[in-house]
Image (cartoon, rainbow, N blue to C red):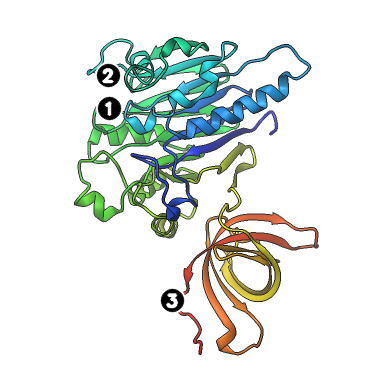
Amino acid sequence: MTQKSAKLIFWGVRGSTPTLERDTWRYGGNTPCLELKASDGTQFVLDCGTGLRMLGNRMRMLNNRWTEGHEAGGVEAHVLVTHYHWDHIQGIPFFHPFFEAQNRFYFYSFESKHLGRNSLRQVLEAQLASPYFPVDVSTMTASRSFREVAGGDSWDIQGTHVTTAWLNHPQGCLAYRLDMPAGSIVYATDNEPGVAEMDHNLRELARGTDVLIYDAQYSPEQLASTRKGWGHSSWLEGVKIARDCKVRNLVLFHHDPDSSSRTVDGFLSAARQEFPATWAAMEGMSMTLSDRGVDVVLPKSRLGQRRRIRFAATVTGQSEDGRTFEEKATVRDLSLQGAYLCLSSRPRLQSELNVVIEAGDHDSSSMLSLRAHVVHCEPMREKNQNGVGVVFIEEAEADLPRD
């Protein structure tokens, strides 16, 4: 990362409650937690859902690696909490850096009318209170300070300017905008549109931002009927905000625990028809902001052992520049869940491909047509060739006939 870049990493992207079901693995099952390293090295943590545990493990590993042969170092970070519902705080007891005395954390959130002053401190301590946890807050030895903020506040944290706005969610919720030399992000999870003042304030907050991370828990149909009043939004509302505010990248976030990867795929596909620069948040996904724009990297698929093979295939899809392509390709390895393809085209991450695998004879009975989702793309050693990792969604609707 250069001095003029900032990196955002998604550690938890699921809403309401963690999920373990296999058909949610591709996007991830941990509840909200994001890490942002600003241009000057200042570290931010956005929300403390169950994804916080994995972030803490990585922080410890990196810090221990740095301190080998040096004086004991420590982690310093600014923790921005949107609200106090369980899915946004339940990672607190399992974040190892909170229990190490050399670390320093600065917490920010709002005063709850249900808790009064020092709301965030009370929430943090309650996570380690009897009979809900076996050790109490005295074991949390890291330095901690707390600042209560409200919608409309703004302040500077070293080289980053932070601004807030209220969102429409039961018992309150804050959106945060962080402006850095490398660019800007807006984190607006847990919001239901329909309150004019809050809708206006959110649009003002999001105007011109490089990355808008927005609540897309429900379908537009659910939002208008069975989930109305639950405090969440849809991909369609995110698209409207992104277009109105000239946002550069929209990230669909806070996936419903009952939404399978295929459901999220559908939301993403629909959103991209209206606003092409849309992404669906995925655990391990990173976004690097710089003067060159926003670079997105997705994690490699964790599903299934792969077998090295060489099959011919025909691949159709959309490239990074929006061009539709069709080309002959080589399948380099294959599992029941996905494949690694060798292509001259460079397909767009999270786009959909159709892969027709030719196994053996070239008659229709030995061809398999599959829909696939692009999760990885990298240059190969061969000139003008790209290694493309895909996970299979299902057999294509227009599957070729078989005996």
The residue drawn where x is 52% and y is 72% is 370
Vertical arrangement, residue 138 with respect to residue 175, above or below: above
Q: CA distance from mark 2 to mark 3?
A: 51 Å
Please provide percent x and percent y for residue 103: 57, 14
Q: CA distance from mark 1 to mark 2?
A: 8 Å
Cβ atoms at labels 3 and 1 below 8 Å apart: no
Q: Amino acid at mark 1?
A: Gly
| Residue 280: x %, y % from top left | 46, 49
Q: Would you call the spot at circle 2 few (<14 residues within 10 Å), some (14-19), or many (20 or more)?
A: some
Q: Name which of mark 1 and mark 2 comes first in the sequence.
A: 2
Question: Helix, strand, or loop for circle 3?
Answer: loop
Q: Residue under circle 2?
A: 112
Q: Where is mark 1, residue-wise? A: 172
Q: Do residues under tags 1 and 2 come within 8 Å of each other at their CB atoms?
A: yes
Label pair 2/3, CB-CB below 8 angstroms = no
Q: CA distance from mark 3 to mark 1?
A: 44 Å
Please tell me whether residue 193 is drawn above or below residue 146 in the rendered image.
Answer: below
Which residue occupies the foreground of this view, 353 or 345? 353
Q: Secondary structure at mark 2?
A: loop
Residue on which the image places disc 3: 397
N-term mark: 2 or 3? 2
For the point 38% across and 49% down, the residue is: 239
Which residue sits at x=43%, y=59%?
269
* Three-letter residue code for mark 2: Ser
Which is more toward the observer, 100 or 177? 100
Mark 3 surroundings: few (<14), some (14-19) or many (≥20) residues within 10 A: few
Give the label, 3 or 1, closer to the camera.
3
* Circle count: 3
